[in-house]
Amino acid sequence: MKKYNVAIVGATGVVGTEMIKVLEERKFPVAQLFPLASARSAGTKIEYNGEKIMVKELTESSFDNIEIALFSAGASVSAMFAPIAAAKGVKVIDNTSHFRMEKDIPLVVPEVNAHALKTYNSNIIANPNCSTAQLVVVLKPIHDKAKIKRVVISTYQAVAGAGKAGIDELAAQTAALLNGKSVTPKKFTKQIAFNLIPHIDVFFEDGYTKEEKKMILETQKIMEDETIAVTATTVRVPVFVGHSESVNIETITKITAQEVRDLLSKAPGVEVVDDPQNNKYPTPIEVAGKDPAYVGRIREDCSCQNGIDLWVVSDNLRKGAALNAVQIAEELIKQKII
Amino acid sequence: MKKYNVAIVGATGVVGTEMIKVLEERKFPVAQLFPLASARSAGTKIEYNGEKIMVKELTESSFDNIEIALFSAGASVSAMFAPIAAAKGVKVIDNTSHFRMEKDIPLVVPEVNAHALKTYNSNIIANPNCSTAQLVVVLKPIHDKAKIKRVVISTYQAVAGAGKAGIDELAAQTAALLNGKSVTPKKFTKQIAFNLIPHIDVFFEDGYTKEEKKMILETQKIMEDETIAVTATTVRVPVFVGHSESVNIETITKITAQEVRDLLSKAPGVEVVDDPQNNKYPTPIEVAGKDPAYVGRIREDCSCQNGIDLWVVSDNLRKGAALNAVQIAEELIKQKII
């Protein structure tokens, strides 16, 4: 079996670290791994398959010998270096928002639109927003069966979505408050320990945040259907890892809760945990470190004709980021694109 | 000015304590305060207006000399003792769910349906569920202006809603986890520290929880309009005090975000905090200890013709419980019902 030289851009970040772990776990055919980072992190060592590998500084020549590059070092880094790598023939799988909505670049969740890899034939492939990835694997089977008209989402997003600084801030603030000390927000706009912040990414004129717009536009692009109406309210919660979503779905044709349960039980990338009488519904700490999008609280919405309410929880570093990126790389091999 | 003998049933609980504080703060015309509780808590002392008052055991004769009784000691206590007090002519304001949906008993949020106190003419008056109270003060002005068709709510509810045991569990679990110890849930079904639990109160056959049904039915009863379609997903979050709600509202006639902002700025019991470009939106720690329902993130919903998304946060022990109960008592005086 052919093996590939794989670069990880942002190898020391929360998502980069998870990418390396996922490559290892899934026995991805890596010939040689090239962890890359900013000058500040270069020189540190990461571990891959029991081997310690030195992190090198990201430069233009970093991609000379590379076949696949997984980027997760921020939109500005992707904006500058992804086109350089792509021009050298590297397949770039980019976890930032930079290229997601560009019309020549596919935005891929393999369970939903793996075929887009071939139809777009682009060296840059975008990985969706974490909240979107775990949503579309759940929406897709429902859309195929009953055609989705409108989706109303409220999110409960973990601090890991804001990287290491987000995790550190929740831990430090919680410890300070339990010791009777006051806290000053740094990474987030307000205290996050024992609090909620209805603000993720920047605000637009119309009152939506960029995170909310991402969920709306990326869902339509991945589902390849701009008629699906979506609104979202995204909220940061004091949870370390694992994004949760309260999702209300209106369909064109009637679908029962049991039909949704049956459909999702067979859906790739989805696991149904829905036995509320026995306290079975997914929660963030139970799904951390796991791959699927977990779905529970599936019920018919009493407020409209064809409505379904449900609750989706997934490890935002896995399906929401690292796992989906590696799955895209696997699809490139499977489809013989690389 | 006439003063009244006031009994507090459940005087040592989280809501009972807050009721005594609110009576004091608002200078409610109390002749004598009678704190009542179970035999287990009887004998302890509470403080009211600088005076220490012994908590007495709740018995049938507790109400002989009472004019107003505020109940917050659980549904079974209300079921047994509220009718006894009412039969003695006491005005009972009950904070439990026991009487809320009974057709002869008014369910009152003074800003919304104070007139119900006169039309029902009942000695028992029900105080709504915490999540409902803070919602209806926001919905009412919008309904009056644009007629609400449907509301989709996702809640983010603080542990104080589960009483002292809920608060203790969040604190103890958080401390244990920060010290590297494992935790075993007692009050809640799962770990609540750094986690979310999409389960408040018991489950019904149709998959909704009782908390969700309360929000649906109580909203319709208080708003006096059963045509308002409501669905809710209620979630416990690791926040000590202050319930938050992501609310999506569809109206019959178009209403702009600015119109909603203007309406709510003038609405009683509501305070608009909505300047997202300057990080102004309400969060639980900022509203704890305060009276109004705070509203922010007001925007036009891009997913439907006449839709509004907004974010409501309020201290669940105040407007959601103690404050609303005392406001009902004030209304009884104002309307010369007592």
Image (cartoon, coloured by chain):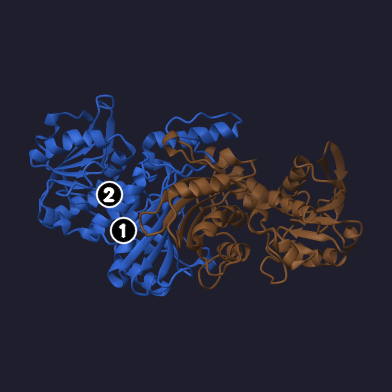
Chain colours: A blue, B brown
- Amino acid residing under circle 2: Pro
Rate crowding at label 1 as few (under 14), some (14 to 19) or many (20 or more) other CA atoms within 10 Å: many
Label disc, if present, on residue A128 of the rendered structure: 2
Residues B278 and A62: in front is B278
Give how far across and how far down residue A308 sits, in percent: 42, 67
Q: In this orientation, does residue B220 appear?
A: yes
Q: Position of residue A32 (x, y in %)?
A: 16, 40
Viewer-side residue, B268 vs A255: B268
Chain letter of mark 1 equals A
Secondary structure beneath label 2? loop
Amino acid type at image mark 1 = Val
Placement of A198 over or under A301, stated as above or below: above
Label 2 Cα crowd, 10 Å radius (few <14 / some 14-19 / many 20+): many
Mark 2, chain letter?
A
Q: Quadrant of residue B277?
A: top left
Q: x%, y% of residue B335?
A: 77, 56
Q: Dot 1: what SS?
A: helix
Q: Which residue sits at x=49%, y=38%?
A: A192
The one of A159 and B179 positioned closer to us in this rendering:
A159
Q: Residue furthest left?
A: A88
Observer-nearest of B142 and A44: B142
Mark 1–mark 2 distance (CA, rounded to whole Å): 10 Å
Q: Is residue B114 above or below residue A176?
A: below
Say which quarter of the image contains residue B65. Answer: bottom right
Q: Is residue B287 left or right of residue A60?
A: right
* Disc 1 + disc 2, Cβ < 8 Å: yes
Q: Which mark is residue A136?
A: 1
Image spot of residue A102 (x, y percent): 19, 46
Q: Earlier in the sequence, mark 1 or mark 2?
A: 2
Q: Please identify the quarter of the rendering in which residue B37 is found.
A: bottom right
